[in-house]
Image (cartoon, grey):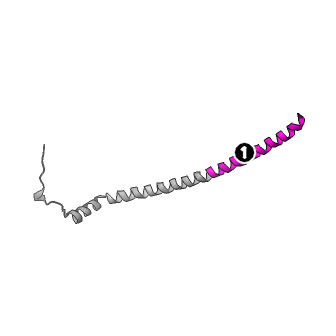
Amino acid sequence: MRSMLLPLLLLATVVTAMGSAYARHESRKLFVQLQQLEAERDAMNVEWGQLQLEQSTYTTHGKVEDAARKRLDMEIPGSEQVMILRP
């Protein structure tokens, strides 16, 4: 019985060491993947902020008025063309 105990303990030690090394390797791979995903998220947040800024500049009153004048040949009506209705 004792003669089988030593090889069994040796085998258990080797298996445990290999399992520990494998778990550490997987942990490192997952950490690298996490860092890549966080970097991608940060880049997307920067792009989102830039797109919001771009959208806000395109919707300013001056840009809308300029587009209306150039593309649609619109102009501000004169005072004789304005009618004010009161309830």
Q: Is residue 80 left or right of residue 61?
A: left
Q: How many marks?
A: 1
The answer to whether residue 73 is above or below residue 83 is below
Measured from the top left, where is residue 32 in percent x and y? 61, 53
Q: Amino acid at mark 1?
A: Gly
Q: Nearer the viewer, residue 24 or 68?
A: 24
Q: Nearer the viewer, residue 71 or 65?
A: 71
Residue 4 highlighted magenta (yes or no) = yes
Q: Is residue 51 left or right of residue 59?
A: right
Rendered-image quadrant of the C terminus: top left
Residue depicted at 13% across the width and 55% down the height: 82
Measured from the top left, where is residue 37 in percent x and y? 54, 53
Q: Is residue 16 left or right of residue 64?
A: right
In this figure, which residue is indicated by the disc labeled 1? 19
Q: Classify mark 1: residues with Cα within 10 Å, few (<14), some (14-19) or many (20+).
A: few
Residue depicted at 23% across the width and 66% down the height: 70
Measured from the top left, where is residue 46 in percent x and y? 47, 57
Q: Is residue 18 left or right of residue 73?
A: right
Outermost residue to the top: 1
Residue 83 highlighted magenta (yes or no) = no
- The region drawn magenta spans 1-30
Secondary structure mostly taken by the magenta-highlighted segment of the chain: helix
The answer to whether residue 42 is above or below residue 14 is below
Residue depicted at 76% across the width and 44% down the height: 15
Measured from the top left, where is residue 63 in percent x and y? 29, 61
Element assignment for label 1: helix
Residue depicted at 86% across the width and 37% down the height: 5
Rendered-image quadrant of the N terminus: top right
Outermost residue to the bottom: 70
Q: Nearer the viewer, residue 55 or 1?
A: 1
